[in-house]
Amino acid sequence: MSLLVGGSVTVFAQSPELLKSYQQAVAFHKKGNYKEAVSFFQKTLKRGEMEFGPDHTISADIMNSLGEAYYAQSRHRKAETFFNKALAIRKKNLAPTHRDIAQSLNNLGLLYADLGRYGDAEEFYKNSMTIYEKALGPDHSRVGTSLNNLAELYRVQGRYAIAEPLYKKSQAIFKKTLGSESFALANSLSNLGLLYYKQGRYAEAEPLFKRSIVVKEKTLGLEHSLVGESLNNLALLYFGQDRLSAAEPLYKRALEIYERTLEPGHGSVAIALNNLAGVYYKQGRYADAEPLYLRSLAILEKSLGPDHTRVATSLNNLAMIYNKQRRFVDAERFYKRALIIGEKALGPQHPNLAKSLNNLARLYKSQGRFADAEPLYKRSLAMNERALGLRHPDVALNLRNLGGLYTTQGRDVEGLEYYRRATAIHQARAAHGGNQSLGGLSEQKSKRYLFTAHVRTAVSVARKSTSDRDRLVSESFSVGQLTRATQAGVAVSRMAARFAAGSDSLAKTVRELQDSIALWQKLDVRLIKLVSATPDKRNRSREKNVRNRLEGLEAKVATLSNKLTAEFPNYTELAASKPVHLGAVQKLLRPDEAMIAYLVTKWVTYVWVVRRESAVVFPARVGRDALQDAIDDLRGGLDASGIDKLADLPTFDRTAAHKLFKQIFAPIDKFLIGARHVFVVADGALQSLPLGVLVTDKPEKEFKDFSGYRQTAWLAKKYALTTLPSVSSLRALRTFAKRAVATIPFTGFGDPLLNGPQGGTRGIKLANLFRGSVANVDAIRDLPPLPDTAKELLALSAAVNGDSKHIYMRKRATERTVKKTNLSNSRIITFATHGLVAGDMKNAEPALVLTPPAKGTTLDDGLLTASEVAHLKLNADLVILSACNTAAGDGTEGAEGLSGLAKAFFYAGSRALLVSHWPVVSDAAVRLTTKMLTAGAGVGPAVALQRSMLALMNSADKPHYAHPLFWAPFVVVGEGGNPN
């Protein structure tokens, strides 16, 4: 809407006091202070009617502005009254094609669109635009506003194909007439972003929302309600991608703005309450969500009336809560009321109605009313396919729900067809680069429920089929990979893509592109946090700096991408961590190798065994919670904390380890005959336990000394085990990431200069290790020294004929040295030191401890963090991380295993890693790693580690090393096979 109407300023000039009063009202309106604006417009109107009469055009101008202020408060009846009065006066006094009549028609169109009177709204918009085009010309900004508003109307109605070109036409007019920094353009960009969001075109929507925020804050200030609107829209996008941690602060910030600048009963407050409640609903916080939904509903019913579409949306959302709480009567009543409202306001084919139908069907399904649910699901599907297209995420949701309806009734063959179609939609979205972005990876993870249901149904059908069994096993194997959208898996794929580039210059371009994208993502997350802050905590100069860097990176990424498209067209295909067909995996395996892949679901754990000539899948009857409890119990027997003497060693429950073996491994053991080396793709809690500690034979109940551990039938004795971050990692490592041709056999860093008391383990848990972004070097200096690591590094180097000049210890073992040394020519690289566990501090990164400098800087503060590791340039066959818990996640909430240091070293360029699952005892670590390299001639890292473990178990001088706490923490991740 526009407040100052052309043609009235001359009349206002006749009354300076009236002009001053009007301008004060306009100022309040522009600031979003609508309550004061209404008050001043009322006073101005009263004065104007006294001076010029109630039927004068200036009275109409003030009435129109007063109507706009009421509209901004969602006081629609008041707004309609004054819009109609203004229109009547203007029609009486002005020519039919006067621009002020067009403005009144436009404003009434906005009002009626808001009230769901779409037919009236369309008529008023078109009449308004016709007048503007005749009075002002087709390229005037008012014509652009009419086009935008008409496009908005079509978007709300689900007529997306008609709306999009109108948005773009309006934006072209705004750029030409108002410039690229105008509010009108920002508003239209945000609206087009909403269109893309509704179509599932998230990557196209995000930059539009962000641009809108920048321009609106610049033109309107930080606290304007229309800024809140754009913050809300960006949060909506993140919510759709299941990035709830990014969406929640933006929703809260939008709500704060609305509550500070608008009336408590304003519709925007209701929308913000509804959206924040949606986050709580997804998080399972129903008690927090319900009161927000109820507040939202009360506001909307009062401001818009009981039959508005937004009321229907609110009713639908409350019904979802009641369904989850098994309050079925309340849920059904609200769903049906929402449907009645929607059908009346939007017509029987609108996509918003499809959502209500889908949800009511889901309610009937949960009540076992399958015959009632099926036609509603099918009607919802047909409506969404017609309105949104066949590849939209909402269509996939419909298909998934129909699949679930059929499988619940035992109609697995029918259900499987629907699951296949739903999975294909999300797989296609991931294939278009989706799983390479933060949002795309999060979106794919959020569909795990669908993928597990697809796997469950395919396996069920396969077990009943004879002719189609092999194809269904292959299908389930591919879909199972979609559930493991891991960061470490993506890192391996990206590393492999660089090595596949061929020439050094092209590989350098690939690395530059990948680094630029990673930095862009990191800065983007930082910017979201900055703009989510309240005004008193906003740092505009820092925001500007981050935005400038983002813009520079966007240009750089575009340039590099274009270059790779021309010179390395297969890059995108290679860099994507997408499912690998079963047959392709089999071709990569050697005769004495196997792959085991796990998928942990609520009630069942699926296990695939892949051999060169065969493949099977087995549903193990142990679910997520039981598996977590079993592994937590086993990990308790591997905890070295607080141990001062051998008598304090925890007893490892071998009986429990045998029970778990019988559940998740014994049923598939017969398919591993002839296998010596086994790749393991773990899932869920299994990521935190090396499978080597499982016990294959029922153990003796008691033993008097540590010889009982030595005689135990550990799985580690039977197989050499290698962990893979994903199934696709095997293809990446064996097809593209060829073995390094290095002239330096060994480079090592360790034995940092530390002054603390002597300690036996290499793990640290300090919450005071940072001061801002730079580590507290004094705290690092007080850590326990690790003199054993010097002996370890020298022995490791000698085992592979290394040169001592490439061993960096004591004063030479600094972070600066690591960053400045050319490591791309080293075949084996070792860090023997303390490891900082990420989980010790909220959102702290995992790190390796090196010799701290006198004063910490960003270049060198004594801690080599995971993000700094990712910037190293490696080309190594093996990186040994002889430190604490280096197999752990990156410290973020819900992080998967291997997402910390392991992911960073893969990305930097290592084909295999030796990492630990718990704090390692220093002397045992020295023996394990040195024996691994001396025993590794002619075999791969996995067999070498197995030999080293067995030797440690049988240590004559330290029989207690037979306890798995000492020999089992390390695992090989990546390429663990024989390099020859």
Image (cartoon, helix red, strand yellow):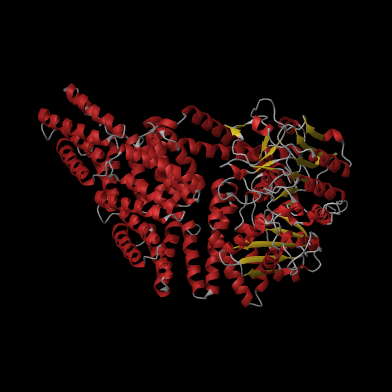
- In the image shown, does 944 or 107 lie closer to the viewer? 944
Q: Is residue 337 above or below residue 536?
A: below
Any part of residue 283 in sight: yes
Any part of residue 144 in sight: no
Task: State the residue at coordinates (66%, 59%).
Answer: 634
- In the image shown, does 691 or 408 lie closer to the viewer? 691
Q: Is residue 821 above or below residue 838?
A: above
Which quadrant holds residue 261?
top left
User: In the drawing, does residue 29 fall left or right of residue 495?
Assistant: left
How far from the left and from the top, in percent, is residue 505?
74, 37
Which quadrant holds residue 555?
top right
User: In the drawing, does residue 212 fall left or right of residue 294?
Assistant: right
How far from the left and from the top, in percent, is residue 521?
57, 40
- In the image shown, does 830 or 474 lie closer to the viewer? 830
Image quadrant in which the N terminus is located: top left
Tally of numbered discs: 0
How far from the left and from the top, in percent, is residue 395?
47, 60
Task: State the residue at coordinates (38%, 37%).
Answer: 227
User: In the drawing, does residue 443 fall left or right of residue 854?
Assistant: left
How far from the left and from the top, in percent, is residue 274?
37, 50
